[in-house]
Image (tube, rainbow, N blue to C red):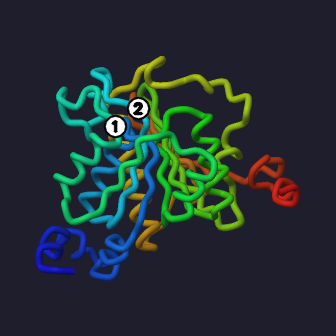
């Protein structure tokens, strides 16, 4: 690290469980963030500010006026009509010009998604629909890449980490194909803007903990937020023996 980096990250480095070694791990890490919306905004901004060396950000959508209420990485109305990944890249490069930002402006699927997941040290899910989450979960499990999952709607949110190291649950153990809220999105149900900020910030913390191998990550633990009453709950998520993704039967079938 050079002198500018030592100064920039000094408040982290002075933490005994981070130090120079932890900061070096962050600088050498590659993180894939899917979605540059309400969750992806704080995730990307905090990871960039913290010095994660290479952020790969993916979003095929364009900035809309209704996004600016919560998607803070897009900053202002001048960004309307710009691809969200490109808009986010502009902000992140201004925030920390010393790291590498790769903006992917098309929807990642199948082999393209698998390639990016394999390259990443951690994948962070900032999507807003179950189809995308199911696909990302399947590929992260196959690639054995840790997945930090988050969701927020109305005044509620959740975060959970899947280690994907051959044991423990996956996202499909939490939600099934016939989940009733399959179509529930912020555009249809609304969301209080700071709630996505809270959940995205927790996802950023969990990502950094995984990279630096510190603390007790939310591996197989579902953290639930009810912001209306400002209550937090933590629940242990067991693996589903009949899960179509991670059960022993599904592994043998594959």
In this view, 108 is above or below 141: above
Q: Disc 1 versus disc 2: distance between alpha carbons?
A: 6 Å
Residue 7, percent from left and from top: 12, 72
Residue at horizontal 71 percent and vertical 46 percent from the top: 173
Q: Please, which residue is most extreme toward the top here?
A: 188
Q: Residues within 10 Å of mark 1 (few under 14, many from 20)?
A: many
Q: Residue at x 42, y 40 (%)?
A: 59
Residue 61 or residue 157, whichever sits in front: 61
**Quarter of the picture holding the N terminus:** bottom left
Residue under circle 1? 84
Report whether 128 appears left or right of 74.
Answer: right
Residue 96: % across, % down: 20, 59
In the picture provided, is 76 more to the left or to the right than 86? left
Residue 158 position in % (x across, y down): 50, 41
Q: Quadrant of residue 231?
A: top left
For label 2, the SS is loop
Q: Secondary structure at mark 1?
A: helix
Residue that label 2 marks: 61
Whether 100 is drawn above or below 128: the answer is: below
The residue sitting at 33% across, 65% down in the picture is 52
Residue at (87%, 55%) from the top-left corner?
253
- Is residue 27 or residue 110 the one in the foreground? 110
CB of mark 1 within 8 Å of CB of mark 2? yes
Q: Is residue 176 above or below residue 208?
A: above
Left or right for 218, reference 26: right
């Amino acid at each position: 690290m050079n002198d500018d980096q030592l100064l920039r990250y000094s408040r982290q480095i002075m933490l005994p469980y981070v130090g120079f070694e932890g900061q070096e791990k962050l600088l050498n890490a590659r993180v894939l963030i899917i979605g540059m919306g309400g969750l992806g905004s704080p995730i990307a901004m905090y990871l960039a500010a913290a010095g994660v060396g290479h952020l790969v950000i993916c979003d095929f959508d364009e900035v809309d006026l209704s996004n600016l209420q919560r998607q803070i990485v897009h900053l202002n109305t001048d960004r309307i009509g710009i691809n969200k990944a490109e808009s986010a890249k502009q902000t992140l490069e201004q925030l920390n010009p010393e790291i590498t930002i790769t903006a992917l402006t098309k929807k990642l699927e199948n082999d393209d998604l698998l390639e990016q997941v394999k390259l990443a040290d951690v994948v962070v899910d900032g999507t807003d629909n179950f189809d995308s989450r199911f696909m990302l979960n399947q590929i992260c499990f196959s690639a054995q890449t840790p997945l930090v999952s988050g969701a927020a709607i109305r005044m509620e949110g959740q975060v959970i980490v899947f280690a994907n190291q051959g044991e423990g649950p996956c996202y499909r153990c939490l939600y099934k194909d016939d989940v009733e809220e399959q179509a529930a999105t912020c555009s249809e149900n609304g969301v209080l803007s700071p709630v996505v900020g809270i959940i995205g910030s927790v996802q950023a913390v969990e990502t950094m903990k995984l990279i630096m191998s510190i603390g007790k990550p939310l591996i197989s633990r579902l953290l639930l937020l009810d912001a209306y009453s400002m209550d937090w709950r933590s629940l242990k998520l067991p693996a589903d023996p009949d899960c179509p993704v991670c059960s022993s039967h599904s592994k043998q079938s594959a």
